Amino acid sequence: MDIVVENIKGLIKSDHPTTTWLAGAEMDTLEIQENAFLCIENGLIHSYGPMELRPQVEFEKTIDASGSFVLPSFVDSHTHLVFAGSREQEFEDKINGLTYAEIAQKGGGILNSALQLRKTSEEQLYQQALARVLEVIRTGTGALEIKSGYGLTLQDEIKMLRVARKLNDTTPVTMKTTFLGAHAFPPDKSREAYMKEVTEVMIPKIAAEGLADYCDVFCEEGFFTPQESELILNQGLRYGLKPKVHANQLNRSGGVQTGVKVGALSVDHLECIGTEEIEALQGSTTMPTALPGAAFFLNLPYPPARDLLKADLPLAIASDYNPGSAPSGNMGLILSLACIKMRLTPAEALNAATINGAYAMEVQDLLGSITPGKVANVFITQAIPSLAFLPYSFGSNLVKTTILNGKIV
């Protein structure tokens, strides 16, 4: 066999390979095998159990995990990891009192990133993004969704998506890509002209080149209306791009209801939701996804996680890694914010960052839990006293060893 991890203090295991997601009260459950071993073979989870049942066969690699926990790698189902440059001047503007909308109105925000991206070559963009991927691997991430949206022209949207596909081919991280041409309206085009370009030019071309798995829209006041969002997402569906929605970040925008109406895989942000949005999600197949890093960075209200779980809904959490509103892809920190600010338990936060995130990327049959037959994407912690120590020690990177596709990274 390839690898055995032995003397594990606590292994987060799952014996339910067909689990679609966890919802409501069941999100607060974790199966922990104490004093455990984990066998990995041919890139897959082979078996696990108590140390006294460890197979007495020869392994290519033996890892002693005394004092450590072994967890499934994080599945970060919402990022904008491919971007050019940074936006720390806007960070200062926010400190000085400007709102997200005010910064956007004076040419900042998404339009600022679009301008920088157009000046950056595809190779430069790839090298910048590669460094970020390597960074998030070190903090426990094994799968990423990457959105476009900083191009706002056909050429530059394609450039972003090609970089994302190249990252998928050149790193051990599992990736999905999302076309987000409907991120903002470029200042040099009318609203009608850009809507036509997104629906009649960009979506057909990007689908024909096989560059995206999903289509997303920033459904928000001052950006894309529910009606415009529905039109774009339905056009994406016609070309095989499943819908996702940036919903209800700044206002009660109608984004959640739009996402449910078109059968979106996920609706993401949810800082501004109430009873109406929660009722719309009930009975749907849409994953509510919170992005606590963005709420933290922009000083916005946090998504009402406890209300969602009380309504027996599932919940995923993701980093929203981007240069303007969440310049960090550290899912360990996102775990802490979800516990501290959204009142999730450590078990709920871990399930939100793993199996439920995997559903939001349609990889739940392969990733998101330590289950025999699934891909061996796991990480080994430093020696820690308990699982709750992970979110408790916010800001610390407690990942000691990362294994992706059955190989030590």
Image (cartoon, rainbow, N blue to C red):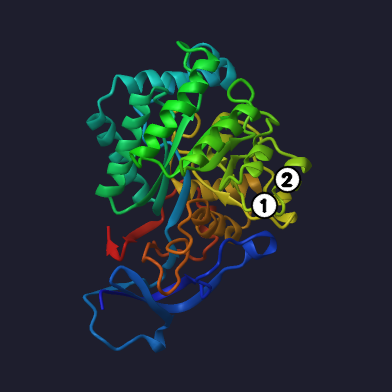
Is residue 176 toward the left or the right of residue 14 in the image?
Answer: left
Question: Quick one: 331 or 22, which is closer to the camera?
Answer: 22
Q: Is residue 299 visible?
A: yes
Residue in the picture at 63% in, 32% down: 300
Q: Quadrant of residue 310?
A: bottom right
Q: Give the labeled residue for mark 1.
A: 284
Q: Quadrant of residue 58?
A: bottom left
Which quarter of the rendering shows the C terminus?
bottom left
Where in the figure is residue 136, as x and y percent of width and height? 37, 47
Residue in the picture at 61% in, 20% down: 222
Disc 2, disc 1: CB below 8 Å?
Answer: yes
Residue in the picture at 45% in, 55% down: 74
Circle 1 packing at 10 Å, graded few (<14), some (14-19), many (20+), is some
Question: Quick one: 113 or 223, which is closer to the camera?
Answer: 223
Residue 280 marker: 2
Up the image or down, 106 lies above or below 289; here it is: above
Disc 1 element: loop
Which quarter of the rendering shows the N terminus?
bottom left
Up the image or down, 29 lies above or below 213; here it is: below
